[in-house]
Amino acid sequence: KRRPKKMLSLASCGAHPDAFARLAALTCPALSTATIGDRRSTLQTAEAPEEILIAGIAAHKHADALAHANEKLTARADALIRANEELSARADALARANEEISASHALAESRAAKLQAANDELKREWFGTIKRSFLLEGQRDQLRCFIRSGSTTAVRRPRLAHTGTTPALTADQFDETIGGGLLRPKGL
């Protein structure tokens, strides 16, 4: 039989002369006792074991190529795993930063609410002060009217020591008395 043109020879593959015996023992037990020059082989030809050896060598080369490709895929998978871990770490950091921002925002809102309440209280006090000021101004005008009319129920007027009489106070004298702190409206 002629060897196919595409089939490689044993010598072109650089195989050791004893390689067939070792390979045949692993791949084909029926050929484990055959040798390259054994014409009594079960295949009745010396070319068939050589073809099997060449096919085994090609299979080993293909297995090496697959192993190399598998190593590359494993390296890429490891790189993707590391990148995923880095992205997870960054996501965790962003989540913690978001939580801190949310906490700061809540604290700022609480402080703003407290400041608003304090501002409202100051406004109430301010309006209360203005109201009391208007009331005091009205009481002052009323006292002035009482003094001008000579009423003795408005304020307690001092008595003169040498006459024993109670003189009426003028508006200016009343202002000076209020300014000096001698007369205080009730509740102040």
Image (cartoon, grey):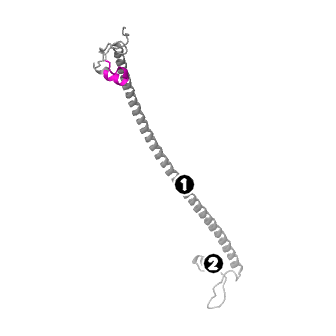
Residue beneath disc 2: 174
Image coordinates for residue 99, horizontal then vertical, percent: 51, 50
Q: In this view, does 152 lie to the left or right of 27?
A: right
Q: Which mark is residue 15?
A: none
| Residue 33 among magenta residues | yes
Q: Nearer the viewer, mark 1 or mark 2?
A: 1
Q: Which quadrant holds residue 131?
A: bottom right
- Label 1 or label 2, whichever comes before in sequence order: 1
The boundaries of the magenta stretch are 21-34
Q: Which mark is residue 106?
A: 1
Residue placed furthest toward the top: 2
Q: Which amino acid does label 2 sit on?
A: Phe
Q: Main secondary structure of the magenta part?
A: helix
Q: Is residue 72 left or right of residue 157?
A: left
Q: Which quadrant holds residue 42?
A: top left
Question: Is 188 located above or below residue 65 in the figure?
Answer: below
Question: Which element is circle 2 on?
Answer: helix
Image coordinates for residue 17, horizontal then vertical, percent: 27, 18
Q: Is residue 29 left or right of residue 138?
A: left
From mark 1 to mark 2, how far is it between C-alphas?
A: 57 Å
Report the residue at 59% width, 64% height from top. Answer: 122
Question: Is 154 located above or below residue 92 in the figure?
Answer: below
